[in-house]
Image: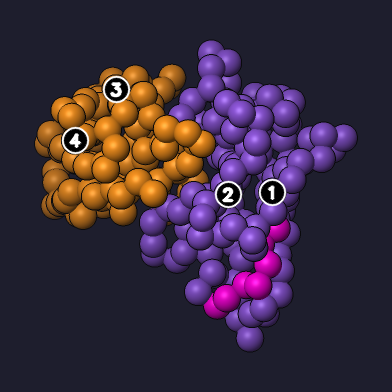
Chain colours: A orange, B purple
């Protein structure tokens, strides 16, 4: 199974701040890496797929990047609606299984 | 517009089974690659399994093998997830989700469209 670590586990930030969340996977295939946003009581929402591709309709302040087995989600200028929990997700090579990181909560400073 | 509408909340006793449904509208079920993810209260996301178009097979997470069955009824465009031998620590919200990017038609190694979730409470 893929092992995922995510840091930080929580971050307090203000509107307008730049926020960076990092995920480290035991396997580093960028094509199979994604980021989600989840708000309380709601289903997760896909933000980024293939490590750096922005899903349709997602604001451009969200971006994804990779460096080896480290994957990063950046919110360039935090907006009030961005306070939520963010999860990374990695897929296995074959057969396709999936693993999620433990999550990072972004709350108001 | 693709929508996944799940069945309502369930209360089950330990040792019993639950079957959750996920009805598709706006698309064809067999073209979506349906998967299931659960989330215990206050906890993270846990992938349970799903249908993979790469090999045309349904794969289950090792943790659930032997206890979970995922099926599809094409006549009603409904996917099902049945989990047996329930334990109290399996109280969770169970989601269906698809790997298909609806806009582009591409297969994703991620989940684009999600159901609203079904709360399953396991309690004696």
Q: Is residue B8 above or below residue A63?
A: below
Helix, strand or loop under label 1? strand
Q: Mark on residue A70?
A: 4
Q: Mark on residue A52?
A: 3
Contact, CB < 8 Å: mark 3 with mark 2? no
In percent of width and height, residue B15 lies at 67, 78
Question: What residue appears at the point 69 percent right and 48 percent down from the top-left corner?
Answer: B70
Q: Nearer the viewer, mark 2 or mark 1?
A: 2
Measured in 3D between alpha carbons, the distance from the residue under mark 2 to the one under mark 1, in whole angstroms, is: 9 Å
In percent of width and height, residue B74 lies at 82, 34
Q: Are marks 3 and 4 on the same chain?
A: yes
In percent of width and height, residue B98 lies at 58, 34
Pinpoint the chain carrying mark 3: A
Residue at the top extreme?
B104
Q: Earlier in the sequence, mark 2 or mark 1?
A: 2
Measured in 3D between alpha carbons, the distance from the residue under mark 3 to the one under mark 2, in whole angstroms, is: 27 Å
Q: Are marks 3 and 1 on the same chain?
A: no
Helix, strand or loop under label 4? strand
Pinpoint the chain carrying mark 2: B
Crowding near the residue tagged with mark 1, few <14, some 14–19, many ≥20 C-alpha atoms within 10 Å = many
Residue at the right extreme?
B75
Q: Nearer the viewer, residue A16 or B16?
A: B16
Q: Which residues are magenta?
A: B82-88
Question: What residue appears at the point 35 percent right and 32 percent down from the top-left corner?
Answer: A33
Q: Is residue B11 above or below residue A84?
A: below
Q: Mark on residue B70?
A: 1
Q: Nearer the viewer, mark 3 or mark 4?
A: 4
Helix, strand or loop under label 3? loop
In percent of width and height, residue A49 lies at 38, 26
Q: Nearer the viewer, mark 3 or mark 1?
A: 1
Q: Nearer the viewer, mark 2 or mark 4?
A: 2
């Amino acid at each position: 199974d893929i092992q995922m670590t995510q840091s930080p586990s929580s971050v307090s930030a203000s509107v307008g701040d730049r926020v960076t969340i990092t995920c480290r996977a035991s396997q580093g295939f960028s094509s199979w890496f994604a980021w989600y946003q989840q708000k309380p009581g709601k289903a997760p929402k896909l933000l980024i797929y293939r490590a750096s591709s922005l899903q349709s309709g997602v604001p451009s302040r969200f971006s994804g990047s990779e460096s080896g087995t480290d994957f990063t989600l950046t919110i360039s200028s935090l907006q009030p609606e961005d306070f939520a929990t963010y999860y990374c997700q990695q897929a296995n090579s074959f057969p396709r299984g999936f693993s999620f990181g433990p999550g990072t909560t972004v709350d108001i400073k | 517009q693709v929508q996944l509408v799940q069945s309502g909340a369930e209360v089950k006793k330990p040792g019993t089974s639950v079957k959750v449904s996920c009805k598709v509208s706006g698309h064809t079920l067999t073209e979506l690659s349906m998967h299931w993810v659960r989330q215990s209260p206050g906890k993270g996301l846990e992938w349970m399994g799903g249908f993979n178009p790469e090999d045309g097979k349904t794969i289950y997470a090792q943790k659930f093998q032997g206890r979970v069955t995922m099926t599809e009824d094409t006549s009603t465009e409904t996917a099902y997830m049945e989990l047996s031998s329930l334990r109290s620590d399996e109280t969770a919200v169970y989601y269906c989700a698809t790997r298909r990017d609806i806009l582009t038609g591409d297969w994703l190694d991620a989940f684009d469209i999600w159901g609203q979730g079904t709360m399953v409470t396991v309690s004696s």
